[in-house]
């Protein structure tokens, strides 16, 4: 298959996915309108801070409540009606994996850190893929290489189960492979991965203005890195370690971890940073810095297996044998448990069948004889909003207005 044909297929997939997302948004709006216990609701889409769950954010409050509850959703459309989710769709780290649980968990943790004391209700993958109750890594897989799911029969007014059409599932048991992958999602783990990726990326740049050094051994110890990459790394450090504080000389001097690992390489070069000598030689490190160094080296070895080699200075004491990283952080295990309580998979019909459900519910709720044309008009209005939403909410009053105009 040629490059042109591949691009055409990607464009077709993207269009189909966007169209399906708009239909799901319309379903949520219609359901929000018909639920009598809701005092108010509104919908957002393409929200940056929602990470992987940015396709639909449904906010609502019931009568007598002052604070809105929020439900985060990602929408995944299948290309064919009979497509099924596979084991690797959940476990693989491949960027285009359909339902990457690790990335969902990372998004979950980031959202939770940003929404302290807010009523986050749950996180849902809405998909037209079919979901078997058991997924094996391969035919010979044993219990440690199997994912199992159970149907969630709990009442859900917003998504509401329809036999053989709308079903909600929870993950009942995860494989040891997925479990180990999730354990390696601490803030220090993620920071180490970002650093490795940034340094590797810089090797592909022809021009550079800022240097990230791997020690104090002269020119051979340097990895050139563009300013924008360093800025992104600095942002990640701020996000993972200091929430939103800027990365500055003052922060470096005050924080024990940063002071132990990084330092300003050259004050004449804005945003230029390098490793400290102690970090390079693995001495006089705080417990946190020591952990980060282990994670950094672990990320390095993983990338080496992919033939992406990072040349470190000779004095950087890298052992040839790396022990498997075992994360004993109780918090991450508790967060994993909480994530699986709040995360669910909502299977939905394919394009045409989903529209049939929407048309039927609109007709029944509003006593319409010509629900087809009303639904078509509503879908067009939601599509117009989607194209220019830029995180602008679609609220209950907007829905009332477009519904009246459609009828």
Image (cartoon, helix red, strand yellow):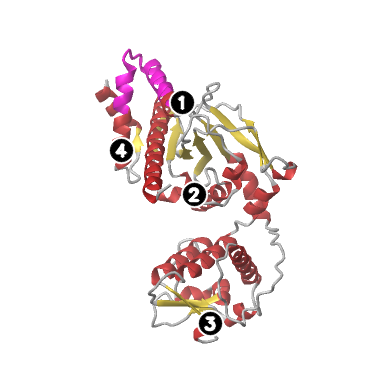
Mark 2–mark 1 contact, CB under 8 Å?
Answer: no
Q: Looking at the image, which is closer to me, 114 or 327? A: 327
From which residue to which does the magenta span run? 354-378
Residue lying farthest to the front in this orientation: 1
The label number, if any, that marks residue 115 in the structure image: 2
Mark 2 lies on a secondary structure that is loop
Q: Which residue is mark 3?
A: 221
Secondary structure beneath dot 4 equals: helix
| In the image: residue 234, left or right of residue 99 | left
| C-alpha separation, residue under disc 3 versus residue under disc 1 | 64 Å
Residue 116 drawn at (x, y percent): 51, 50
367 is within the stretch colored magenta: yes
Dominant secondary structure (helix, strand or loop) of the stretch shown in magenta: helix
CA distance for labels 4 and 3: 52 Å
Which tag is nearer the camera, tag 4 or tag 3?
3
Nearest to viewer (mark 3 / mark 2):
3
Q: Is residue 253 visible?
A: no
Q: Residue tagged by mark 1?
A: 37
- What x and y, as percent, mark residue 282? 65, 78
Residue at figure coordinates x 33%, y 14% from the top left:
368
Which SS class for mark 1?
loop
Which is more toward the observer, 63 or 244?
Answer: 244
Q: Earlier in the sequence, mark 3 or mark 2?
A: 2
Q: How many angstroms separate mark 4 from mark 2 (CA)?
A: 26 Å
Q: Residue at x 45, y 64 (%)?
A: 235
């Amino acid at each position: 298959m040629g490059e042109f044909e591949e691009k055409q297929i990607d464009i077709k997939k993207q269009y189909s996915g966007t169209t399906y997302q708009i239909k799901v948004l319309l379903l949520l709006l219609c359901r929000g309108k018909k639920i009598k216990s809701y005092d108010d609701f509104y919908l957002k889409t393409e929200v940056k801070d929602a990470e992987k769950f940015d396709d639909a954010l449904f906010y609502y409050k019931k009568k007598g409540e002052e604070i809105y509850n929020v439900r985060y959703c990602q929408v995944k459309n299948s290309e064919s009606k009979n497509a099924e989710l596979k084991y690797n769709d959940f476990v693989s780290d491949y960027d285009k994996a359909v339902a990457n649980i690790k990335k969902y968990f990372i998004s979950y943790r980031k959202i939770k850190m940003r929404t302290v004391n807010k009523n986050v209700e749950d996180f849902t993958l809405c998909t037209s893929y079919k979901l078997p109750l058991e997924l094996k890594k391969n035919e010979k897989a044993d219990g440690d290489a199997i994912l199992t799911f159970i149907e969630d029969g709990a009442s859900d007014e917003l998504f509401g189960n329809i036999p053989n059409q709308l079903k909600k599932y929870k993950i009942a048991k995860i494989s040891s492979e997925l479990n180990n992958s999730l354990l390696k999602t601490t803030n220090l783990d993620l920071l180490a991965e970002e650093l490795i990726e940034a340094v590797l990326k810089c090797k592909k740049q022809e021009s550079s203005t800022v240097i990230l050094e791997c020690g104090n051994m002269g020119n051979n110890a340097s990895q050139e890195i563009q300013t924008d990459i360093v800025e992104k790394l600095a942002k990640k450090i701020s996000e993972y370690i200091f929430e939103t504080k800027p990365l500055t000389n003052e922060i470096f001097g005050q924080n024990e971890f940063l002071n132990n690992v990084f330092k300003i390489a050259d004050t004449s070069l804005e945003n230029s940073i390098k490793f400290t000598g102690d970090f390079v030689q693995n001495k006089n490190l705080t417990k946190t810095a020591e952990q980060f160094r282990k994670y950094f080296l672990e990320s390095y070895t993983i990338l080496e297996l992919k033939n992406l080699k990072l040349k470190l200075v000779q004095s950087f004491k890298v052992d040839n044998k790396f022990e498997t990283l075992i994360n004993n952080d109780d918090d991450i295990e508790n967060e994993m448990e909480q994530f699986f309580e709040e995360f669910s998979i909502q299977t939905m019909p394919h394009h045409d069948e989903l529209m049939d459900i929407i048309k039927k519910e609109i007709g029944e709720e509003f006593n319409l004889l010509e629900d087809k044309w009303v639904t078509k008009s509503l879908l067009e209005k939601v599509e117009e909003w989607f194209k220019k939403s830029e995180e602008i909410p679609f609220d209950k009053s907007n829905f009332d207005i477009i519904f009246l105009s459609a009828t």
